[in-house]
Image (spheres, coloured by chain):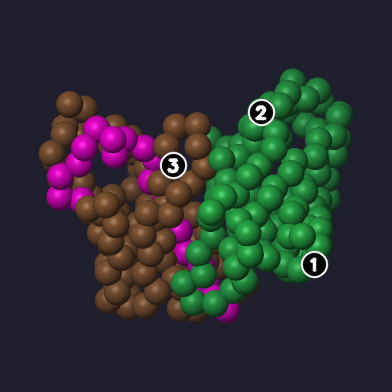
Chain colours: A green, B brown
Amino acid sequence: KAGVTQTPRYLIKTRGQQVTLSCSPISGHRSVSWYQQTPGQGLQFLFEYFSETQRNKGNFPGRFSGRQFSNSRSEMNVSTLELGDSALYLCASSKTGQGVGNTIYFGEGSWLTVV
Amino acid sequence: GDSVTQMEGPVTLSEEACLTINCTYTATGYPSLFWYVQYPGEGLQLLLKATKADDKGSNKGFEATYRKETTSFHLEKGSVQVSDSAVYFCALSDPFEGNQFYFGTGTSLTVIP
């Protein structure tokens, strides 16, 4: 069974540009959530999608957005990139995204460097 | 709000030594508790979980017990191996607060031969 797949794995962007990251969840999983990981802030929740609807959102500026498609694949977009957006962006999927013991499964992440 | 506090690292141990990584949590509801592990250059992998008080999660020789009275979920292993070198994250999820996971800051473990 294939795991969570994220593309691209590595990318370098210039300040002011925008970036789109893609995530394919485990087959049958309908919930996709996104996290930003940095050495200083650790893992921070960005947002969660279920059935193409954003169900929960973390405390990030509006430059960070996402969407989910009917096949549960998800994309996140960061516009007007800042140096501080350099991070590992992790996507995680789960079957329903709710319930006791609900487990999320992570992809390997997309490493974004902003120069 | 919900939060997780875990032991600061880095931790360096000799092979076959005992490991304990402390984790305490604050939650308004009845959270599920998790330990995830991250190997260099990879995403997080689920190590173990527990969903109610006194539950013990275990996997690959690692164990953690959900202690509601002390709001703790300490990770333990009796004999570590070099292959256990990684960063360990304690996390909680409140089933009544959506799917948002709250993670600790991570504890880096290095096991030397």
The part of the chain drawn in magenta is B77-96
Under circle 2, the secondary element is strand
Q: Are marks 2 and 1 in contact (CB under 8 Å)?
A: no
Left or right, residue B96 beside residue B92: right
Q: Nearer the viewer, residue A5 or B109?
A: A5
Question: Measuring 44% from the left and 32% from the top, which residue is drawn there?
Answer: B40
Q: CA distance from mark 2 to mark 1?
A: 27 Å
Residue at the top extreme? A115
Kind of residue at disc 1: Thr
Kind of residue at disc 3: Gln
- Chain for disc number 1: A
Q: Earlier in the sequence, mark 2 or mark 1?
A: 2
Q: Which residue is mark 3?
A: B38
Question: Measuring 86% from the left and 29% from the top, which residue is drawn there?
Answer: A16
Question: Measuring 27% from the left and 52% from the top, which residue is drawn there?
Answer: B60
Q: Residues within 10 Å of mark 2 (few under 14, many from 20)?
A: few
Residue A34, percent from left and from top: 66, 52
Left or right, residue A103 beside residue A81: left
User: What's the mark number on residue A10?
Assistant: 2
Residue B57, percent from left and from top: 30, 65
Left or right, residue B99 beside residue B38: right
Residue B26, percent from left and from top: 44, 67
User: What's the mark number on residue A53?
Assistant: 1
Q: Residues within 10 Å of mark 1 (few under 14, many from 20)?
A: few
Q: Nearer the viewer, residue A15 or A74?
A: A74
- Is B94 inside the magenta-drawn segment? yes
